[in-house]
Image (tube, grey):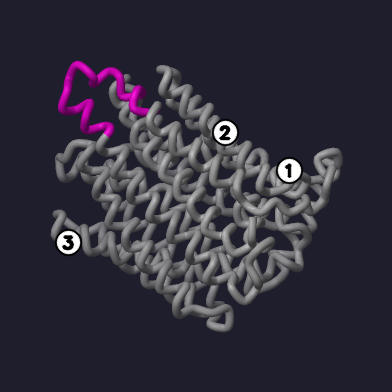
Amino acid sequence: MRRAASLPLLVAGQFLGTLGDSALLIVAVQALARARAPAWEAPLLRILFYGAYVLLAVVAGAVADAFAKRDVLVVTSLVKVLGCSVLAAGGSPLAAYTLVGLGAVPHMPARYGILGEFVAPSRLVAANAWLEASTLCASILGIGAGGALVASGERHPALAGMAQRPAWWLDAAFVGAAVCSSLLLRAPAVRPGGWRRVPGAALRFRRAAMSLWSCAQTRGALTLTSTLWGVAAVLQLEVLRWTTQRLQLPLSSAAWLQLAVAAGMVCGAAAAGRWTTLARERTAALAALGGGATLSLLAFATGLATALPLLGAVGVFAGWALVASNARVQAGGKRAGGPGEWLAVQHFIENAMSLALLAVYGLAILCGLSSSPVILAMGCGVALSALASLC
């Protein structure tokens, strides 16, 4: 397999995997609703998903570097197939999504680490833009696919109690991702047999973390990416709650409103890949500042006419900031050891933030907090994070 052909295959595999992830979340939320599960179990889906990242981050980098990254991507995609099959067979949505999270733990450092194996440093921003754009496009279609699968149950009451059955169709997406990954250029492992050194993984993780955090530019980029992904995790669920409770729309219709954010993020990621370079250090922070201000305005929206453009603008700012910040972290990560190690640190920080914000969000629901103060708090948090990264 030539290097030139590997990037499109990686993008295609990422597209299929993310499509399955996004659709599976909507189907799992509907399965919980049909089972009359407590409202706080919806954020618990994502808490279990991100919890797997946080608990296993120390060894995730060692695993990603100990084997050929192509092989890691194939195996982790198959683990996602298993998780999706659990839901499809009528198992617990929480257990199914936890399995998907376990598969995603080594998948992320392998996915971003493999970029350096067939992409020159000067092309990192553009390659990241392609990868992020495929992720966001897949999120759009995945949300739509999940909404369509859920809508079939809403239209046909006889099928309402079987929301998990459409998950069989989602297995095809994860299988397709595994096939694309199996065709990638197979470069040797960065540290063959490194899995035998798991006892020392904590020390290597600590060294990589200190190296990343000691650089002011990388620290600022990590602050932005972790805040943005954490807020995105909460916003994905909050948009569903806001539209079903405040606008009185069914879940299938509410799922489609997430498309405004995802479509905006695609445009923002594409713009960043076209016009942003590593030399423009403040671009990511300024984009995040705009996203935080726009998200704060959403708290005062009273209908679709105002909410849709605001959600789209939030997506544009977030997509631009994420692509620019990720490229900065990758550039700084080359000084922090093997790609699996520093990528595991990055994803640990990002997912720990997501886990913390989801826990706070679940507590807010338990306390009966309405959507407007939750959305306003998220917008202010993003803006403060952007200002902190500029200092």
* Residue 117 located left or right of residue 225: right
Neighbour class for label 1 at 10 Å: few (<14), some, many (≥20)?
A: many
- C-alpha gap between disc 2 and disc 3: 42 Å
Label 3: which secondary element: helix
Q: Which residues are magenta?
A: 149-167
- C-alpha gap between disc 1 and disc 2: 16 Å
Circle 1 residue: 63
Mark 1 or mark 2: name the one nearer the start of the chain.
1
Mark 1 or mark 3: name the one nearer the start of the chain.
1
Q: Nearer the viewer, residue 173 or 304?
A: 173
Label 2: which secondary element: helix
Query: Of the residues shown, which amino acid type is indicated by label 2?
Result: Leu
Circle 2 residue: 78
Farthest residue, direction bottom: 279
Farthest residue, direction front: 1
- Residue 356 percent coordinates (x, y): 52, 46
- Which label was assigned to residue 76? none
Residue lying at 53% horizontally and 77% vertically, measured from the top left: 390
- Which label was assigned to residue 306? 3
Residue lying at 39% horizontally and 50% vertically, measured from the top left: 138
Residue lying at 33% horizontally and 48% vertically, measured from the top left: 141
* Residue 281 located left or right of residue 308: right
Question: Split into 4 quadrants, where in the image is the N terminus?
Answer: bottom right
Question: Split into 4 quadrants, where in the image is the C terminus?
Answer: bottom right
Query: Of the residues shown, which amino acid type is indicated by label 1?
Result: Val
- Residue 22 percent coordinates (x, y): 40, 42
Q: Nearer the viewer, mark 1 or mark 2?
A: 2
